[in-house]
Amino acid sequence: MNTLFDKIWDAHVVQQVDDGPTQLYIDRLYCHEVTSPQAFEGMRSRGLRCFRPEQIICMPDHNTPTHDQDKPISDPVSKAQVDLLAQNAHDFGLTHYGMMSKDNGIIHVVGPEKGLSLPGMTIVCGDSHTSTHGALGAVAFGIGTSEVEMVMASQCILQQKPKSMRITINGTLQKGVTAKDVALYLMAQLTTSGATGYFVEYAGEVVRHLSMEGRLTLCNLSIEMGARGGMIAPDEVTFEYVKGREYAPKGEAWDKAVAYWKTLKSGADAVFDKELTFDAKDIEPRITYGTNPGMGIGITESIPQITQKEPSLLCNFQKALDYMGFKAGEKLLGKKIDYVFLGACTNGRIEDFRAFASIVKGRKKADGVVAWLVPGSWAVRKQIEEEGLDKVLADAGFEIRQPGCSACLAMNDDKVPAGKYAVSTSNRNFEGRQGPGSRTILCSPLVAAACAVTGVITDPREVMSDK
């Protein structure tokens, strides 16, 4: 029998080019302001209209400021890109969720929460973290700008079929360990290129017990192992999450959809190109110490001593440590931090804010720490307020900002200054990712909260134990 990936892929094949790629039908195209302008311009230059405009959703997120969104964007480049997306969406008759719209936010947060992303779909966007949507049981992956234009024009794309990998995580997660920690652990085990060329299906007891928010986080970070995408078979957790959402099927259509979605799982005898198995007991809360997401350790561990004989590996390892101001063999616990960022398409959902609030409740933000708490959408912000989390956070000295990608990639005003340490729930810690010269330590919302109230890198279990 076929894998879950095979079932969805094969159902969307339009034709197979001899000795070439597959022409794959795409159910949903998401467009944001950074990777779409050239695609729209290409469509104009050829006198084309979008083939199926109702299947294309446009939304600014990368360049949007996270404060004063009701005022003109001050940065001219950001303003130009956001304004151009609105104009292009209007000219091509596409759905556009602009700034200050109740439907706006980070596209990879809004898609699932509105039911625009559904099990069994093929989903693409000019953004690598499109893999997020695979958590719903979809084949979702990032594409280039020329491919965005291809989908606009034909609702199809030419793709080589990736190989398949299944990662099984058995056991039960320990206290304080989240989906983010699982993902950071997998990246360290596989390295940032260990899944290159593969589409990953996550399975096992740990995955089955993850909430949908946790699954979205795990699939979001698949790309950081080099994978083409990640996915999880839809189950009752999925159906419960999707049911009643704005674009989800209703009535008889819902029953019919669920009956089909229940068939979307790998067969007992499905053959994967690669299988890996891990045990939850080996995973503790994690942090990164270097300049790629695979350079991570358990929060109680020490930075490793590099033993590779390959000079280039040793050089890159040392270069990363020099940039971060760390040394091999040292622990990071107790290291002073300057910034805390909660948000991004990785950890900007309601569950992440609940986790952060559970740590800071009854405590105060540490002096000298700048904290940016940025919901992934206006819907998340509304839920934060409805649950009273904003009051809990305000009492502890934190402020909720407006939705956007924010300090994940510093294409907006939220930039970490050079030399400063930012504990971040985002997805990448490359040199300068959060601002020129900034130093990023990736972690979960629980770790971020613990650091925010202590001012130093802190094991969240230490803070959780005395509550």
Image: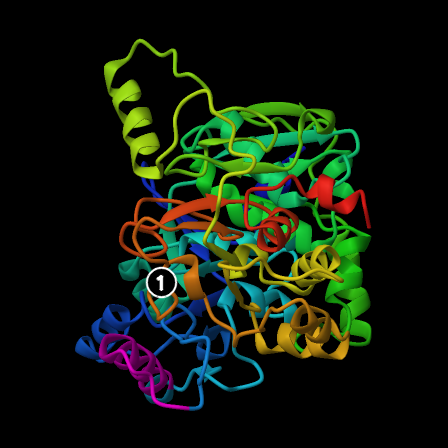
Q: Position of residue 305 (x, y in %)?
A: 42, 16
In the image, what residue type sits under mark 1? Answer: Lys
Number of numbered discs overlaid on the protein picture: 1
Residue 195 lies, in percent from the top left, at: 46, 32
Residue 115 horizontal side relative to residue 150, left or right: right
Q: Is any atom of residue 227 visible in this view? A: no
Q: Residues within 10 Å of mark 1 (few under 14, many from 20)?
A: some
Residue under label 1, please give it.
Answer: 415
The vertical placement of 336 against 33, above or below, is above
Q: Is residue 53 magenta?
A: no
Q: Quadrant of the N terminus?
A: top right
Q: Is residue 454 visible?
A: yes
Q: Nearer the viewer, residue 70 or 337?
A: 337
> Which residue is painted at 58% across and 84% down in the image?
102
Q: Which residues make up the magenta segment? A: 71-89
Q: Quadrant of residue 251?
A: bottom right
- Work out whether residue 21 or residue 440 is closer to the camera in this orientation and state it: 440
- Per the image, label 1 sits on a secondary structure element best described as loop
Q: What residue do we see at 75% from left, 58% from top?
A: 358
Q: Is residue 76 magenta?
A: yes
In the image, residue 237 lies at what x, y percent? Answer: 79, 54
Is residue 427 left or right of 299 when viewed as pictured?
left
Position of residue 417 measured from the top left corner of the image (x, y, whole percent):
33, 57
